[in-house]
Amino acid sequence: MGQKVNPISYRLQVNKNWRSNWFARKADYRKWLIEDIRIRELIEERFKARPTIDNIQIERSPNLITINIRTAKAGAVIGKGGSGINEMKASIEKVTDQPVRINIDEVKKPELSAKLVGENIAHQLEKRMNFRRAVKMALASTMQAGAKGVRIEVSGRLNGAEMSRREKFIEGSVPLHTLRADVDFNVARSHTQAGIIGVKVWIYKGERG
């Protein structure tokens, strides 16, 4: 049987980094980990209707939590006159007992983000678009944006079929075993009337290091 490994964790400290950066005493570890999960869920839930968040990095210092949000639509996250940031900051500070600072970084090419591509496909499947059309459009736009290769897998009751199945689409090359390869990966879920459809996306951007 295949030994499945997440391509991000497989490349940690080679060309990927942890998405939470902090050290904790044994007494604080559990509390901070739960806080990080709640912060991520709170931010993701806020923009659930429109897939705009690429990733969320959390850094902790003794008296401050810094949250760096990479997004495809910075204006939507910041809000009119910074109102969106202030509301988000207030709701996060209710979860944690430390002051929070939020930085926004705009993604130049959202087509090269596995998370945004996967969530976009999932969003289209929820609107009853044919899965082949949704996937092929995503493959074409990602390759046009400069990717070296894309692999997309969708599984579940595709197009409302009675039997669930898995379909795989590959464009270019995606070397999963090469540590130098910069591979972005994400899993998205589409909640359709027929049930949940899983969408896995691998994007190969070339070799690093």
Image (cartoon, rainbow, N blue to C red):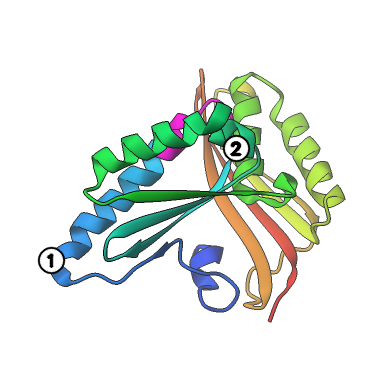
Residue 182 lies left or right of residue 199; in this view the side is right
Name the quadrant containing residue 90.
top left
**In the depicted view, which residue is nearer to us: 102 or 55?**
102
**In the depicted view, which residue is nearer to us: 150 or 95?**
95
Residue at 53% over, 51% down: 55
Residue 166 visible in the displayed image? no
Rendered location of residue 167, percent (x, y): 66, 42
Rendered location of residue 205, percent (x, y): 74, 63
Residue at 61% over, 28% down: 123
Disc 2, SS: loop
Residue located beneath label 2 in the image: 52
- In magenta segment, residue 5: no
Q: CA distance from mark 1 to mark 2?
A: 35 Å
Residue 108 lies left or right of residue 80; in this view the side is right
Residue at 56% over, 65% down: 7
Q: Residues within 10 Å of mark 1 (few under 14, many from 20)?
A: few
Asked if the residues shown at circle 1 and circle 2 are in contact, with their CB atoms under 8 angstroms apart, the answer is no
**In the depicted view, which residue is nearer to us: 113 or 77?**
77
| Residue 189 versus residue 49 in the image, above or below | below
Tag 2: amino acid: Thr
Determine the residue located farthest toward the right in the rendered image: 144
Residue located beneath label 1 in the image: 27
Q: Quadrant of the C terminus?
A: bottom right
Any mark on residue 118, and which?
none
- For the record, the magenta segment spans 43-50
| Residue 25 versus residue 158 in the image, above or below | below
Residue at 35% over, 49% down: 100
